[in-house]
Image (cartoon, rainbow, N blue to C red):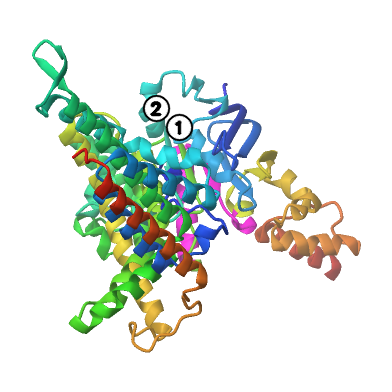
C-alpha cells in the first residue's frame, strides 16, 4: 500500500533572494499511511505551519515533491483545487473565515466550490454539522450570532463537509475553555473512527497528543526531528525537553518514579494507563 | 506576495536631511513644489536639479532607490509627452503621415517630463527621510492653528497614525483569510470580472468583521488608558526647531530667489 502523504526532500524558503531570506523547512522526508491520527508538535517557528500548508498546495515548495495518494500535487497546476478538496485544512482560529448569511450556506461553501449537486450539498451539510456535534436548528442562524466555540465548530464543519481524505487541524482548541477543548477533540477522534480518514492535529498540548494520536511528528528548527509512534516519541523525553517542548505531565511523574526504582520498564504517557498500572501495583502490595 | 508590499518608504538614517524638523520638511516640500512651478526655462531647472541631487546626496539614500520611485509614473510621462509632441502647433520639425512634431511641442514635452520627474524625486525625499509617525505628528502641529475654526487637527492626525499602524496588520489578516478560503476551494485567480468580484466576498466580509472588532477593542484599550482626545495631552518627544531648520529654509529661499532672477533675465520657454 502506498502512503497517503509522501513528502520528499521538501524545502521552503521565505523571502527568497532578499536579505531576509530564511529557510522555513529544510529537507523534510516523510511518509504517512492512510488512516493514521498524527499529532504534530514543535516549538513556535519550527516550521509546523509551513509544512501543513504545503500538504494542500497553499504554499509551493522551493524544492522537493509532495505526493497525496500517490499523486504529485504540483504535476498539473490546474488540479491544485482538487488537491485542496482532498486535503482539508482547518487554520488556527478558523471562526474568522465565516462569512455567509446562514450557518448552512457557510458550511456549503466548500462543497459548492467542488461543483456538487444541491442534494449532495444538503446531505453533506447536515452530516457535517452532526459530526461536530451541533444541533440542526443552528443551520438557519447567522454564524455571527453563535458563541465562540460554536463558531469554531461551524468552521471545522465547513472543511469536513468537503469529505477530505486527509484532515489537517492547526491548533483547533486554541483559546477555548477546557470543556470546549475536550468536546472538539473527542469529536475529531470520533470523526476519525467513523470515516477512517487520515488526520493531522497540530497541538501544543502533549496530553492531547498522547490521548488522541497514535503517531507523532516532531518538527525542530525547520527540520523533521522524528516521525514515530507516540510511545517512541515520548521515550525520548530528554531530547524533547531540549527543544523547548515537554512530555505529558504523567510521563514526567513516572520518569521520577523510575529514578526511584518503580516501574522502570514502563512507558507511560496517558493518565488512563497510569491509573491502571498504579491500581495493579497497589493490589499486589496489599496481598 | 501581499506581505512584500512595502509601506511608506521610510529609509532609516541619521543624515542632515533626516534631522530636519518634520514640520520644516513639509513646509520645504511645499516650497519646493511651488519652486518647480515657477520655473520657466531649462536654466531654472538646472538650479532645481542641483537642489534635488544635493538633497539626495546629503540624505545618503541610494540614488537607485529614488530613481526606482519614478518608475510607476513613466507611463504617465510618456503619455503626456506624446500629447504635447503631437498636438502643440508651431514650427514643424518633421512629419510621419498625418502626425506632425513641432519644435514647440518637443520643447514642451521635455520641459514637462523634467518637471514631473523632479517633482516625484523631490517630494519622495520627504517620505524617504521622515518616519510616518513623525509625519503625522508634524501635520497635527502644522494644522493646529486651524483648531480656532473648529478643524479637528488632533483627531485627523490620530486617525492617520492608527491607519498607518494597522495597514500591516490588515495585510497579514487578508493573507490569512485568503489562505483559509482557498483551502475551502475558493477560486480567486480565474473567471471573468463579475466572477472575480464575487469571489472577493468571502474575503471582504470576514476582513470587515474583524476590522470592526479590532476598532472596538482598540477604542476600549485607549479609553482604559484614559484617552480623551488631544486636550491637555503632552508628548514624550516634543518637536523643536533647530539651527539646521533655519539653514535649510535659507537655502530653499536662495534657490527660489535664484529661479525668479533667472526667469527675469533668461527668455521663457512656456
Left or right: A150, with B87 as reference point: right
Looking at the rendered structure, the secondary structure element under dot 1 is loop
Left or right: A145, with A46 as reference point: left
Residue A191 in the image: state x and y as whole percent: 44, 45
Q: Give the range drawn in magenta.
A: A179-208
Left or right: B4, with A140 as reference point: right
The answer to whether marks 2 and 1 mark residues whose Cβ atoms lie closer than 8 Å is yes
Residue A181 within the magenta-colored segment of the rendering:
yes
Quadrant placement of the C terminus of chain A: bottom right
Which residue is at a point 23% across and 46% down the rendered structure image?
B201
Relative to the observer, which residue lies in front, B107 or A131? B107
Relative to the observer, which residue lies in front, A138 or B230? B230
Looking at the rendered structure, the secondary structure element under dot 2 is helix
**What subunit carries mark 2?**
A
Q: Mark 2 points at which residue?
A: A80
The part of the image, by quadrant, that contains residue B68 is top left
Does B268 sit above or below residue A76?
below
Residue A273 in the image: state x and y as whole percent: 69, 57
Does B103 sit above or below residue A142?
above
Q: Mainly helix, strand or loop, the magenta region?
A: helix
Q: Mark 1 points at which residue?
A: A57
Quadrant placement of the N terminus of chain A: top right
Residue B256 in sight from this viewpoint: yes
Residue B160 in the image: state x and y as whole percent: 33, 65
Which mark, by number, is residue A37?
none
Amino acid at each position: 500500500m502506498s502512503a497517503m502523504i509522501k513528502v520528499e526532500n521538501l524545502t521552503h524558503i521565505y523571502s527568497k533572494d532578499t536579505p531576509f531570506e530564511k529557510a522555513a523547512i529544510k529537507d523534510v522526508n516523510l511518509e504517512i499511511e492512510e488512516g493514521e491520527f498524527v499529532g504534530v508538535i514543535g516549538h513556535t517557528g519550527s516550521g509546523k505551519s509551513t509544512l501543513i500548508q504545503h500538504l494542500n498546495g497553499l504554499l509551493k515548495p522551493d524544492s522537493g515533491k509532495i505526493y497525496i495518494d500517490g499523486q504529485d500535487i504540483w504535476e498539473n497546476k490546474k488540479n491544485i483545487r482538487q488537491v485542496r478538496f482532498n486535503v482539508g485544512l482547518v487554520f488556527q482560529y478558523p471562526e474568522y473565515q465565516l462569512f455567509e448569511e446562514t450557518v448552512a450556506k457557510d458550511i456549503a461553501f466548500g462543497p459548492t466550490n467542488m461543483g456538487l449537486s444541491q442534494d449532495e450539498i444538503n446531505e453533506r451539510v447536515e452530516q457535517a454539522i452532526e459530526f461536530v456535534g451541533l444541533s440542526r436548528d443552528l443551520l438557519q442562524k447567522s454564524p455571527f450570532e453563535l458563541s465562540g466555540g460554536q463558531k469554531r465548530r461551524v468552521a471545522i464543519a465547513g472543511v469536513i463537509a468537503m469529505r477530505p481524505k486527509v484532515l489537517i487541524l492547526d491548533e483547533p482548541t486554541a483559546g477555548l475553555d477546557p470543556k470546549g477543548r475536550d468536546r472538539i477533540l473527542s469529536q475529531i477522534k470520533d470523526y476519525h473512527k467513523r470515516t477512517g480518514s487520515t488526520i493531522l492535529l497540530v497541538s501544543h498540548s502533549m496530553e492531547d497528543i498522547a490521548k488522541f494520536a497514535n503517531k507523532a511528528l516532531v518538527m525542530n528548527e525547520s527540520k523533521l526531528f522524528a516521525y514515530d509512534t507516540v510511545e517512541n516519541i515520548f521515550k525520548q523525553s530528554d531530547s524533547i525537553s531540549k527543544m523547548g517542548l515537554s512530555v505529558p505531565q504523567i510521563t514526567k511523574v513516572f520518569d521520577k518514579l523510575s529514578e526511584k526504582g518503580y516501574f522502570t520498564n514502563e512507558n507511560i504517557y496517558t493518565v488512563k494507563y497510569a491509573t491502571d498500572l498504579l491500581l495493579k501495583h497497589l493490589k499486589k502490595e496489599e496481598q | 506576495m501581499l506581505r512584500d508590499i512595502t509601506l511608506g518608504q521610510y529609509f532609516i538614517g541619521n543624515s542632515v536631511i533626516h534631522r530636519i524638523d518634520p514640520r520644516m520638511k513639509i513646509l520645504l516640500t511645499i516650497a519646493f513644489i511651488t519652486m518647480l512651478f515657477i520655473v520657466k526655462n531649462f536654466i531654472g531647472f538646472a538650479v532645481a536639479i542641483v537642489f534635488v541631487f544635493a538633497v539626495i546626496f546629503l540624505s545618503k539614500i541610494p540614488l537607485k532607490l529614488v530613481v526606482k520611485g519614478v518608475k510607476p509614473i513613466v507611463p504617465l510621462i510618456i503619455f503626456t509627452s506624446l500629447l504635447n509632441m503631437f498636438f502643440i502647433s508651431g514650427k514643424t520639425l518633421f512629419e510621419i503621415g498625418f502626425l506632425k512634431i513641432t519644435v514647440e511641442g518637443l520643447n514642451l514635452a521635455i520641459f514637462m517630463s523634467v518637471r514631473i520627474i523632479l517633482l516625484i524625486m523631490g517630494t519622495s525625499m520627504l517620505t524617504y527621510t521622515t518616519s510616518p509617525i513623525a509625519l503625522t505628528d508634524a501635520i497635527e502641529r502644522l494644522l493646529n492653528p486651524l483648531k480656532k475654526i473648529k478643524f479637528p487637527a488632533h483627531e485627523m492626525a490620530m486617525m492617520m497614525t492608527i491607519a498607518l499602524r494597522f495597514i500591516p496588520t490588515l495585510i497579514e489578516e487578508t493573507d490569512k483569510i485568503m489562505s483559509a478560503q482557498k483551502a475551502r476551494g475558493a477560486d480567486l485567480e480565474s473567471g471573468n470580472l463579475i466572477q472575480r468580484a464575487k469571489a472577493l466576498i468571502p474575503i471582504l466580509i470576514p476582513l470587515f468583521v474583524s476590522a470592526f472588532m479590532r476598532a472596538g477593542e482598540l477604542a476600549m484599550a485607549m479609553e482604559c488608558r484614559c484617552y480623551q482626545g488631544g486636550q491637555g495631552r503632552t508628548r514624550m518627544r516634543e518637536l523643536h526647531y533647530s539651527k539646521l531648520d533655519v539653514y535649510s529654509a535659507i537655502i530653499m529661499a536662495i534657490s527660489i530667489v535664484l529661479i525668479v532672477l533667472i526667469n527675469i533675465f533668461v527668455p521663457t520657454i512656456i
